[in-house]
Amino acid sequence: MLKSDRVGKFLAGWPDPLFGTQVVWSFRLEYQALQHTGMLPDVIFQELLAFTGGLGTEATPRRGAVLAVLAYLFEECEIFERPVEDVE
């Protein structure tokens, strides 16, 4: 979560103003496709890690970047469902 702001700054500074929107929509579509398979949320998260490029389980700078991207998408873009207790 601490590094998710860097992702927002990166997307905001990208020369193509539509790039951030394209990234968000690609994750939204991937999440919806995974959700429709009936996977459990933890499995969906692991699949999204792989989709983002974070296949390994070891702590590496790449893994940290992948987690920052997912944190940004979860918090800023609200492309994923929130747990029921968070909605109330």
Image (tube, grey):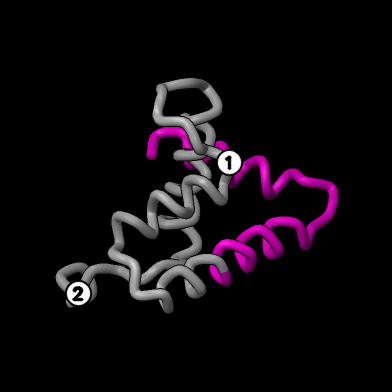
Quadrant in which residue 28 is drawn: bottom right
Q: Quadrant of the C terminus?
A: bottom left
Question: What residue range appears in magenta?
Answer: 1-29
Q: Earlier in the sequence, mark 2 or mark 1?
A: 1
Q: Is residue 49 left or right of residue 1?
A: right
Which of 8 and 38 lies nearest the eye of the viewer? 38
Q: Residue at x 48, y 21 (%)?
A: 60
Within 10 Å of the Cα at label 1, are there few (<14), some (14-19), or many (20+) other Cα atoms? some
Q: Mark 2 vs mark 1: give the one in front.
A: 1
Residue ID for mark 2: 84
Label at residue 19: none
Residue ID for mark 1: 53
Q: Residue at x 75, y 57 (%)?
A: 19
Q: Is residue 65 left or right of residue 1?
A: right
Q: Position of residue 63 (x, y in %)?
A: 48, 30
Q: Is residue 77 shown above or below 47? A: below
Q: Is residue 9 shown above or below 63? A: below
Asked if the residues shown at circle 2 and circle 1 are in contact, with their CB atoms under 8 angstroms apart, the answer is no
Circle 1 — which element?
Answer: loop
Quadrant in which residue 84 is drawn: bottom left
